[in-house]
Image: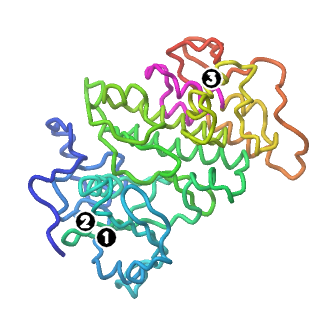
Amino acid sequence: MGNCGTRGESAVAVAHVPVRSASLEKKQSRSFSDLSDSSTPRPFEDSRNISIYTNTIAFTLFELETITKRFRSDYVLGEGGFGTVYKGYIDENVRVGLKSLPVAVKVLNKDGLQGHREWLTEVAFLGQLRHPNLVKLIGYCCEDDQRLLVYEFMFRGSLENHLFRKTAAPLPWPTRMMIALGAARGLAFLHNAERPVIYRDFKTSNILLDSDYTAKLSDFGLAKLGPLGDETHVSTRVMGTYGYAAPEYVMTGHLTARSDVYSFGVVFLELLTGRKAVDKTRPAKEQSLVDWARPLLSDKRKLLQVIDPRLEEQFPARAAQKACSLAFYCLSQNPKARPLMADVVETLEPLQDAAAATATPTATGPRHRRPAGPAGACRSVRSPKCSPATAPPPCRVR
């Protein structure tokens, strides 16, 4: 296997890392098995000996050519900024001791938008982080100028396809809430690490679904380690996807965990409305989903007007109102007014439970009529009457 790292190619994951304390060094000297359960990835200098620090397999290019039939076109699952993704199957015929399972093989496009640094960042994070709502990185290949990644195969593909592909059946309300909760748990896990990880590219195409519609975050090429100690943000080149990036990050390059919360708000709004974050085919005032929805979300009398009409009124009204209010706070222009992802998870859990309870064969008739009483979605530590109509800036959803 060729040497694919140089002294000048420090991993993106080690950017902004100050001198470590003795206690942190001790934690980073844990065993191989400990690292696989860690919520704080260990940075490493370059791509030499990656498997020493990560719970991954170093595949040869020949092995990956074998399982994808030399990257045949009928094995293509999709394409993205990184390159083309192929379906494959690993077992003991590939290498003795390998567990039999389908995989997705992502091949770096050398002329694409991402390169070695993003590849190395993805291995650094996903090779060490383990969580039910993160896609599992099984292995990698680094031979000469070839860069490949091998993931668990996600049977149902991306959330983007399920929401926006014309031939796809509309996702029912309970499934949408389950997906939102799973994605929120993945982000909360990253943010709650001892050294927080900022995902930076949260969008529907990066949320993959398994056979049970469990949501898992993928594509960590743009992830960054968050601020440490007294630092309030990480200064970085603005990257991500138009329509999902937080406005303060776009304007200043200052990245925080609250930037991810805004991106979550955009995706959550896509789940609620069935609309794309940016859709140039719509009238001018509706092309930006956030700009179109924000005035409706700020008026409790109009909240439910944003709900996807393809649901045909099959959703619990109170849960929908609370979900819309949660989206409103996540999309606050003031980063400090956005909830923490842990608070988002806490808010979504009862909404998902309510959605599951209403998804029964005996439930009939429209469910979206507004019930009597206020439609406030979040309880604020400072004000128990928090609602989109009053919208105090420091509100944290619970």
Comparing 86 with 190, the one in front is: 86
Question: Label 3 is placed on what type of residue?
Answer: Cys
Number of marks in the rendered image: 3
Question: Label 2 is placed on what type of residue?
Answer: Ser
93 magenta-colored: no
In percent of width and height, residue 161 lies at 59, 56
Disc 3 target residue? 378
Question: Label 1 is placed on what type of residue?
Answer: Ile
To which quarter of the image does residue 281 belong? top right
Q: Is residue 45 above or below residue 303?
A: below
Query: Rounded to the nearest whole Å, what is the CA distance between mark 2 and mark 1?
Result: 6 Å
Label 2 or label 1, whichever comes before in sequence order: 2
Residue 57, numbered label: 1
In percent of width and height, residue 218 lies at 44, 54
- The structure's colour scheme is rainbow
Q: Secondary structure at mark 1?
A: strand
What residue span does the magenta drawing correspond to?
A: 324-347
Report the predominant secondary structure element of the magenta stretch.
helix
